[in-house]
Image (spheres, grey):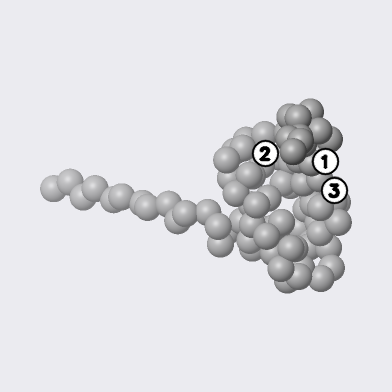
Amino acid sequence: MSFPDADESQERQPPVNEEEFNAQKENILKQILSSEARMRLNNIKMAKPELSNHVEQYLIGMASQGKVRSPLTDDQLKQILLAIQQPKRDFKINRR
């Protein structure tokens, strides 16, 4: 009875590191977003990285379910962003 070494099991399963994951994610986003929408998402990534990650996960999930047929336009991405962002609460203080 022979047991596989740890090295053999790693050869069968390709390691998925963060660099490969990011490359796959960028490839999927290139397919489902127009160039203007990708620029907007990159701008958001610089200002609000957590919102950008949330939107990217949402878009990749939609694409994997087959709900994204053609590249999304910038206007469609704006609508998704508005839907995802939590509404800001305005407080008005009345002083007498």
Judging by the rendered image, the residue that carries numbered circle 3 is: 27
Circle 2: element type: helix
| Mark toward the viewer: 3 or 1 | 1
Say few, some or many: other residues with alpha carbon within 10 Å of mark 2 (under 14 / 14 to 19 / 20 or more). Answer: some
Sequence-first tag of 3 and 1: 1
Against 66, is 87 above or below?
A: above
Q: Residue at x 68, y 60 (%)?
A: 61
Distance of mark 3 from mark 1, alpha carbons?
Answer: 24 Å
Q: Amino acid at mark 3?
A: Asn
Tell me residue 33's x, y (percent).
Answer: 81, 56
Q: Amino acid at mark 1?
A: Arg
Say few, some or many: other residues with alpha carbon within 10 Å of mark 1 (under 14 / 14 to 19 / 20 or more). Answer: few
Judging by the rendered image, the residue that carries numbered circle 1 is: 12
Q: Amino acid at mark 2?
A: Lys
Tell me residue 10's x, y (percent).
Answer: 78, 34
Rendered image: mark on residue 54 = none
Query: In the shown orientation, is residue 92 left or right of residue 37?
Result: left
Circle 3: element type: helix
**Number of numbered discs:** 3
Of 58 and 41, the residue lying toward us: 58
Sequence-first tag of 2 and 3: 3
Give the residue at the far front of this rendering. Answer: 1
Tell me residue 60's x, y (percent).
Answer: 71, 56
Distance of mark 1 from mark 2, alpha carbons?
Answer: 35 Å
Is residue 74 visible from the viewing direction of this image?
A: yes
Rendered image: mark on residue 45 = 2
Circle 1: element type: helix
Q: Residue at x 81, y 33 (%)?
A: 8
Of 88 and 92, the residue lying toward us: 88
| CB-based contact (under 8 Å), mark 1 and mark 2 | no
